[in-house]
Image (tube, coloured by chain):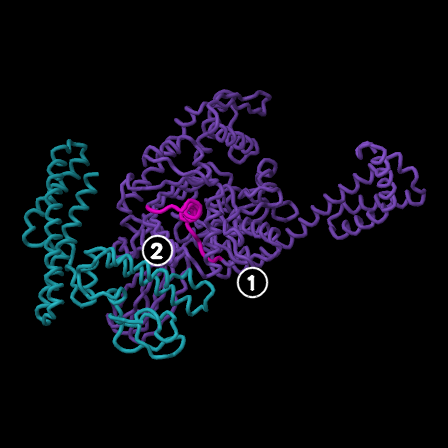
Chain colours: A cyan, B purple
Amino acid sequence: MSTPFPITDSPLVCWSCHERTIGTHFCASCGKMLQLPEKSDYFAMFEIPRKLWIEVAALEKKFLQLSWKLHPDNYVNAAPEEREISLRRSSELNDAYRTLREPVSRVEYLLAIEGARVEGKSKQQAPPELLEEVFELNESLDELRETRATSGDTTALKQRLESAQKNFQSKLEEVDGELQVTAKEWDSAADAGADETKRKSIMAKLNELLNRRSYIRNLVVNVQKELL
Amino acid sequence: MGRTVGIDLGTTNSLVAYVDAKTGEPKCIPGPSGSTLCPSVVSLDADGSIIVGEPARRRLLTQPERTIYSVKRLMGRGPADVQSELKLFPFRIDPASKSVIRVQLGDKIFTPPEISSFILRELKNWAEAYFGESVDRAVITVPAYFNDAQRQATKDAGRIAGLEVLRLVNEPTAAALAYGLHEKQRGTVAVYDLGGGTFDISVLKLISTSEGDIFQVLSTNGDTHLGGDDIDHLLQAFVHEQILQHDQIDFSPHGELAQELRKELIDVKHRLSETDKVTLRFPLPNGKVFEYEFTRGALEALIRPVVDRTMAPVRQALADAQLSPKQIEEVVLVGGTTRTPLIRRTVQEFFDRKPHTELNPDEVVALGAAVQANIMDRGVQNMLLLDVTPLSLGIETYGGAVAKIIPRNSTIPASAQEMYTTGVDNQTGIDIHVLQGERELAKDCRSLARFNLRIPAAPAGLPRVEVKFLIDANGILQVAAKDLRNGEEHLIEVQPSYGLNDADIERMLEESIEYAEQDFAQRQLIEARTEAEAILTATAKALANPKAASLSEPERVKVERTVAALKEAVKGPDYKLIRKKIDELNHATEHLAEILMNSAVQAALEGKKLAEV
């Protein structure tokens, strides 16, 4: 079995035939499903490089192929140990597919395995350039709740909030655009074999974008809830 | 190893099916009456034996306090969850019920998994009688929207019935399997499944690959307390009100009269699917007869709220699958309640597509379960099912909020890891609360389990324990913890918030075997008595035949004595004695039978019919 992206560089010992083997999913000697080694990652599981542009159709095809082989339905009559491995491997496959399929969770995951994901200190921490608009939005939300409590007319407030929501929605799209551009930067850096400094600076930028995205997204969701 | 079957454990009816090895087609197994439907009704007889199915259903009218139906509504639920149901269902809940509901039947107390296990055991018996072989493994279907506790309760029921549950399969997915096999459909499919007590909608993608066909569920949604029962309740409430107004008779849901009326109304409901007008005539205790003409239009106006309640989950499932109604290529209707014309019209209008109803909606889920049982039993396959978890899994965080760790509609098995450490020196435990649901606050989600993660004493922040939450292919949660400092791993025994523990299940399994033995004796007795009656009738008829006059006096006396002995034995409970007396009578009447046979042959030769002999 050729393994262009071995799940691990160091040979594993197969749990079944006890041979030392380098494989991604199955033992090269006896063909049994391998236990997932420590420090394996989702990219390796799909045998793709740690890059952010992924062809989703190819990912799905690989996912379905591996599902045939790893799914617990295949191991009903197998030994308990192998059944247990199948359960783990197939849950990890599903977790991996779920994570890599969506661009945002893909970026989050990449940063996490590169040790570069630093979440915002708190949800209240607004990006500086948004401070003023967020302040206004929160005021409008408070006003809406008060007006509702006193059964006043909320039409004008609602309109104001709807336009604020649109504003933040478009900011969200901006962030997504920036994420795309930065993701391409990461991929080119990976292709060029860029040095650690370069990699770190791109990851820091991706991290900052993710935090901003999650902040704005929360705002939009909160406004949506109030407007329902 | 015994056989493997597929079982649809339904709210109203349950079925058992298998795949015929020759034709490769799934088939439902009939019970002793010839019907493949086993009413999901259980009754406790005065002598302590358990009666299941059609005979139990008849007892709803005569012994309602010893009989229970729709027990599926109680599976995996706590006493507080079912308060609203109690107004409408004649469930007698033991007031001492704590986390698991206990139901009273006569003078005995049972849990819902035990009652379900009686139904499963009955179906197991059907299948064993059919194959002449033991059946010890099963695939059992559950509503797709069942939560962890409801799934666990179903699996427990299987264990108590002496079945190894190979897999719990979601009902709409099972239906898709049955249809996929039948129609060879490909593309996106929506399965709308409205049964007796539950509603599910699932969106699937059928994919052909070089290895075989994959049934991939994209999303699922539903309501585990919405079904034909709710339509019955609306009808009942309507008629109760009418009778109260006109005749000042108040129906309690517990009474025999209410059960009788319920039966009539279900009949009215069924007939209104075929015709436009049905008149109900119901005799009242005051001697009057309540008469009311139902039209289909009036019924539809009455049940529209139920039908409308199904549409919000349908929209949500499509949104989660990122598909519009137009992008759905096939629509499948499952569940007896989808025979209702209003539902057919509503679904057809929504998808702008004629739904599939070719397969019997009562049988299709069991057929799909049989297909999956066959796949798993043989381990070789050209079909693969990838299902999803219907509800998000979360853990409680500070301030009663929920952090989602596995989102709904994730393909299962699925897992998530969380890292835990301590906040103060020498802290030896961390409380973990696992929940299921879409709401943001823990109090609004379903509590699955609470447990205390034990941690060796150490300075604050030093321990590093990774907890792995895994939802298996049955949709059931497993929790394991790993101490990252020493690599020690252990499975955490999680006591479910609304479930039975292993000791409970073991005890119930033992008791259930006792019941099974009692059942066996009871069954043998009934069969022996039936046979005795048949031979007694035949003997009396034979003795009355003029040709019997040629029987010698001692022979006649012997026959009469044996008849008396058999009649005596039939009065008692000993089926072996009855069998013995049947044999003796058979022996004693040999000559008599011969005489009659000879005269019959003669008669036949003379051109007379046998019946005239």
> Which image quadrant: the N terminus of chain B?
bottom right
- Disc 2 sits on a residue from what chain? B
The residue segment tinted magenta is B165-187
**Mark found first going from the N terminus, 1 or 2:** 1
Q: Which residue is nearer to you in this view: B393 or B497? A: B393
Taking the spot 8% from the left edge, 44% from the top edge, the residue there is A136
Q: Does the magenta run of residues contain B179?
A: yes
Taking the spot 53% from the left edge, 60% from the top edge, the residue there is B506
How many residues crowd around disc 2 within 10 Å: few (fewer than 14), some, or many (20 or more)?
A: few
Q: Which residue is nearer to you in this view: A32 or B429? A: A32
To which residue does mark 2 refer?
A: B209
Relative side of B221 to B18, left or right? left
Relative side of B503 to B188, left or right? right
Taking the spot 86% from the left edge, 47% from the top edge, the residue there is B588
Q: Secondary structure at mark 1?
A: loop
The spot of residue A199 in percent (x, y) is 11, 68
To which residue does mark 1 refer?
A: B1
Question: In the current view of this chain or complex, which residue is farthest to the right?
Answer: B553
Amino acid under disc 1: Met
Amino acid under disc 2: Thr
- Disc 1 sits on a residue from what chain? B
Q: Secondary structure at mark 2?
A: loop
Residue B516, above or below B60: below
The spot of residue A201 in percent (x, y) is 8, 66
Residue B524 is marked as: none
> Which image quadrant: the C terminus of chain B?
top right
The spot of residue B384 in percent (x, y) is 39, 56
Instruction: Evaluate whether residue B254 shows in this view.
Output: yes
**Circle nearer the viewer, 1 or 2:** 2
